[in-house]
Image (cartoon, rainbow, N blue to C red):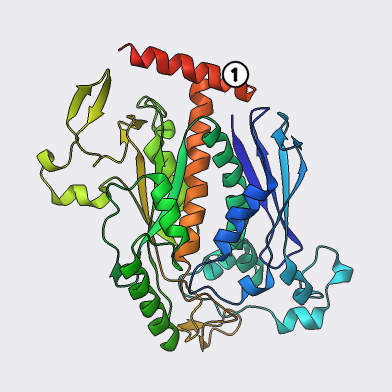
Amino acid sequence: MLRYLTAGESHGPALLGILEGMPAGAPVLPELIDRHLHRRQGGYGRGGRQKIERDHAELLCGVRAGEAIGSPIGIRIENRDFANWQGVLGADPASVDPAKAAERALTRPRPGHADLAGGLKFDRDDLRDVLERASARETAMKVAVGAICLQLLEAVGIRIAGHVVRIGPVEAPPADGLGVAEIAARAAESSVYCVDPGATAAMEAAIRDAMMSKDTLGGVFEVVAEGVPPGLGTHAAYDRRLDGLLAQALMSVPAVKGVGIGLGFGVAERPGSQVHDEIFYREGRYARGSNRAGGIEGGMTNGEPVVVRAALKPISTLPRPLRSVDIRTHEAVEAAYERSDTTAVPAASVIGEAAVAFVLAQALLEKTGGDSLGEVRRNLDAYLARVAER
């Protein structure tokens, strides 16, 4: 079973990750992981933290000469900003200066963040203990893990690309008809990872307006996966339905508040004749006249591209703080503010790729089994040959 665990705080020494279940022989190239980490740090509207960090995945174990060896893969990403938090954060009591810690304590929870709910849950009077782990900084490790899964998927012909379709009031035209390679190429040319140049310019303008207003913007990103074989996932058990697993993985990304597959919420607006994808048999294979289902029916892939969208709320750390209450005095105050992105939707599209990649890799290995990449390929080829005979 493919699984992973992350650890680490936003301003602590490092983020840690363990990925277990990667087949031996699967490619694990550090430069490809770092490429995705750098994409996550980019995008117009990002804040000052990205000027500090130079994210790099240090592979500690489980990899030899660019290949997984079958044992758990250990990953470390340094937090360069930890240097600015000496005396405030640290596991050893001797490393913490009580005066510095008190000066930087967080007692003014931000509406929309985990601050207050986490402080109540864990009985903390300094909400920094919650902020540090709830921060989207943790997604750097999600991207590193996902980048390894992307390499496994590409080795068997599955490719994934994400792109931004909305920031604030600006929505891009549909990217219908574009393949994954074209989506990736066009998104790479855009400052906001959008495939449409006109929408890119309008999104930049909306971000600048939000900066001037000391506000933040949310949006929507889409992730597309091609080459996905039919039959990943299952209809037979609620907790193994692929659409449910994809939704959970994307909803676990901080600030994501909605997930749709294919038409998503659009299915509620149309009659059935405009929702379901008609089935044809052409050139020895089943085909569809459309892909409104987003490649998933009954909790399983149907052989069409998997298409998933996620809605990201505006970042909850506002330069113009909202009203709040001090948890120690119960007095009315402005919410805490240190620094913030104006928008993180472009970065979220990269994180979304990683989340989708992990779920598809997990489903692939569940279907094919295999302790080595060669075994996975043989089992997949045998399955696809059987499907082709139907």
Does 155 appear above or below 220?
above
Of residues 373 and 263, which is closer to you in this image? 373
Q: Where's residue 320, x and y in %?
A: 47, 87
Quarter-of-image position of residue 280? top left
> Is residue 121 something that shows in the picture?
no
Residue ID at (42%, 43%)? 246
> Is residue 298 something that shows in the picture?
yes
Does 378 appear above or below 321?
above
> In the picture provided, is 78 more to the left or to the right than 354?
right
> In the picture provided, is 259 more to the left or to the right than 89?
left
Looking at the figure, which quarter contains the N terminus? top right
The residue sitting at the right extreme is 94
Of residues 89 and 354, which is closer to you in this image? 354
Say which element carries label 1.
helix
Q: Where's residue 271, x and y in %?
A: 10, 44
> In the picture provided, is 67 more to the left or to the right than 340?
right
Which residue lies under the disc numbered 1?
375
Does 9 appear above or below 359?
below
Q: Amino acid at mark 1?
A: Glu
Residue ID at (35%, 44%)? 307
Looking at the figure, which quarter contains the C terminus? top left
Residue ID at (64%, 74%)? 51
Few, some or many residues within 10 Å of mark 1 (<14, 14–19, 20+) = some
Does 386 appear above or below 58?
above
Q: Where's residue 211, x and y in %?
A: 45, 84
Of residues 365 and 154, which is closer to you in this image? 154
Quarter-of-image position of residue 274? top left
How many marks can you see? 1
Residue ID at (33%, 11%)? 389
